Image: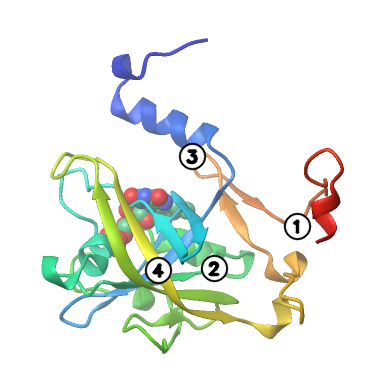
Amino acid sequence: MQLDPSELAQKDRYRLLIGLVVPRPIAFVSTVSRDGVTNLAPYSFFNGLASEPLSVLFCPANRPDGGEKDTLANCKPESEGGTGEFVVNASIEGYAAEIALAAEPLPHGESEFDLTGLATAPSTRVKPPRVARSPWAFECETLQIVRLAPGVPNAGNVVIGRVVRIHVDDAVLDAKLRVDYDRLAAIGRLGGIAYCKTRERFELAPGKTGSRASA
Ligand SMILES: Cc1cc2nc3c(=O)[nH]c(=O)nc-3n(C[C@H](O)[C@H](O)[C@H](O)COP(=O)(O)O)c2cc1C
């Protein structure tokens, strides 16, 4: 089958995108509004961007009415009315249900921390709190926002953030900074309402010789 995206309805383009580009890591993003209300929401259009500088990106689409989701409104630069900061928390089996629950579009001024019952922990370098139970968290300063179609319903935006503080639970990391994936128990997102676990794995050395694998 071949499909022309310009002939597909937006909901079908979305269905194909989230069904085919799998598995996706999930950023559980905490922010705070200029008036001090905390916010927490999952974003699976997410990835690490670079280690130089250490940076991540995630993609909050516009709401169906073309407006900004709370996370974007909160993490955009101060010059645009936001705080310019966000925290990426881990998405793990231990609070998977709370991650899905936090996708509830709450009225402005209500916090998904209260809705989910997840406790906060203070951050070190940024104002948004962390999820206390998260085995790792990246405190981030917003570097840049790319808006694909401002004001257009469901249009995409890319938030690029520089990681200014790293938190990791000692239980999931050894002295050589290697992660224990069984202890981390990260989850990823598939299409529809499906998720995946990361406790089944296999190993392959890269390239012809795999010589870099042991480096
Ligand atoms: C696992 C999961 C992943 C999601 N990923 C995204 C995403 O990448 N981009 C997006 O715009 N919405 C995504 N959503 C939907 C948002 O979480 C939802 O719109 C939420 O209400 C946004 O909250 P906010 O307005 O507080 O930022 C996702 C939902 C779930 C459950």
Q: Residue at image x 55%, y 63%?
A: 96
Residue type indicated by callout 3: Gly
Residue type indicated by callout 4: Arg
**The label number, if any, that marks residue 199 in the structure image:** 1
* Residue corresponding to mark 2: 90
Residue type indicated by callout 2: Ala
In x, y percent, where is residue 33?
A: 21, 75
Give the camera-side residue of 104 and 39.
39
How far apart marks 1 and 2 lie (CA) works out to: 15 Å
Position of 56 with respect to 142 (left or right) is: right
Within 10 Å of disc 1 (Cα), the crowding (few <14, some 14-19, many 20+) is: some
| Colour treatment of the image | rainbow
Number of the front mark, 1 or 4: 4
* Residue corresponding to mark 3: 192
How many numbered marks are there? 4
Give the camera-side residue of 27 and 12.
27
Q: Is residue 184 above or below residue 114?
A: above
Give the camera-side residue of 200 and 208.
208
Q: Residue at image x 45%, y 84%?
A: 119
Q: Earlier in the sequence, mark 3 or mark 2?
A: 2
